[in-house]
Image (cartoon, helix red, strand yellow):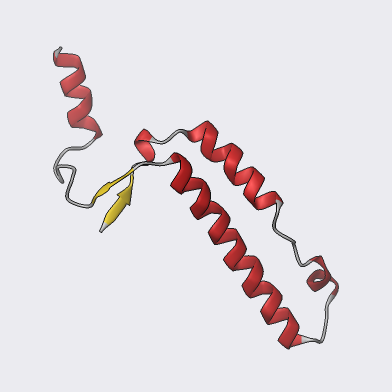
Amino acid sequence: MQRLRWDKADLPRYYNLSYQYLADITVPDWLLVGSNDKEHAHSFISRFYCGTVAALSCASQCSVPVAKQNFLKFWWDEQCQVLKDEST
């Protein structure tokens, strides 16, 4: 299993890519005015959700490195890193 390494991510690139990808998704605005067409509403909501997830996933694949789940030491946390940095 792999983990996203958000601590090593290129966050400006992620923000830009996610903005670009999310801007391409059609928002089903007509659902806000109250429609009785539940079958089409479910379909549009599902497509909107899947498009949003896909956009964020694509942005992360391009800008966030991944590592194996057990790659990092489970006991190493931010406090350990601070102590290590102060010791040098």
Occupied quadrant, residue 27: bottom right
The residue located at (38%, 40%) in the rendering is: 6
The vertical placement of 42 against 63, above or below, is below
The residue located at (21%, 37%) in the rendering is: 77
In percent of width and height, residue 10 lies at 45, 33
The vertical placement of 65 against 22, above or below, is above
The vertical placement of 42 against 31, above or below, is below
The residue located at (67%, 73%) in the rendering is: 45
* Quadrant that contains the N terminus: bottom left
The residue located at (60%, 37%) in the rendering is: 16
Occupied quadrant, residue 75: top left
On screen, residue 27 versus residue 78, left or right, reads right
In percent of width and height, residue 7 lies at 35, 36
* Quadrant that contains the C terminus: top left
- Comparing 19 with 79, the one in front is 19
In percent of width and height, residue 51 lies at 61, 63
Occupied quadrant, residue 19: top right
- Comparing 32 with 7, the one in front is 7
